[in-house]
Image (cartoon, rainbow, N blue to C red):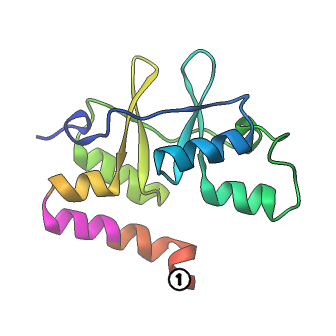
Amino acid sequence: MSVVREFMTTNAQCVKEEQSLRDAAVLMRDLDVGSLPICGNDGRLKGFITDRDIVVKCVAEGLDADRLTAADLAQGTPIWIDADASIDAAIDLMEKHQVRRLPVITDHKLVGIISQGDIARNYTEERVGELVEHISAKSPMAQLG
């Protein structure tokens, strides 16, 4: 059975929880990504931030992206998966929480990210189709498009 570490992207970078939202946006631009894990100084996962979070929760509200920090947008308990978990477990977690990417953790530290795209490139078409269908069917944003 395939495990997450076989498919994940290993060069994942974090935005530190005390960094500004502008810093997070610059890092996203430089890495050409739309989201980043938020990590504490101890390297532990504190949350996940998206470019949409920055726009909707900061810019659209007229708030200062230089003053708000990544930690200000980290809400709730972060969803993650262990590097040795099965791909089916990752798919189930993505479907349950309607997310397209999951931080991958080993020994309490971020070691990668697994995305819907990573799975699509490496897994059966049927299972990937189910994943996309379940995430998109339940996603409020999918209904707007």
Q: Which residues are magenta?
A: 124-132
Q: Find out whether residue 125 is within the magenta segment.
A: yes
At x 31% / y 39%, what residue is drawn? 9
Q: Find out whether residue 66 is within the magenta segment.
A: no
Where is 99 relative to 83, above or below? below
At label 1, counting other C-alpha atoms closer than 10 Å, the crowd grade (few under 14, some 14-19, many 20 or more) is few
Q: Is residue 32 left or right of residue 144?
A: left
Residue 21 occupies quadrant: top right
- Main SS of residues in magenta: helix
Residue 39 occupies quadrant: top right
Q: Is residue 70 left or right of residue 83?
A: right
Task: Return the residue nearer the eye: 102 or 32.
Answer: 32
Q: Is residue 140 left or right of residue 99?
A: right
At x 64% / y 42%, what residue is drawn? 24
Where is 108 relative to 84, above or below? above
At x 86% / y 49%, what residue is drawn? 64
Dividing the image into 4 quarters, which one contains the N terminus? top left
Q: Position of residue 76 (x, y in %)?
A: 66, 42
Q: Position of residue 94 (x, y in %)?
A: 40, 54
Residue 27 occupies quadrant: top right
Q: Position of residue 91 (x, y in %)?
A: 31, 53
Label tally: 1
Amino acid residing under circle 1: Gln
Q: Give the residue number, with chain letter if any, for mark 1.
A: 143
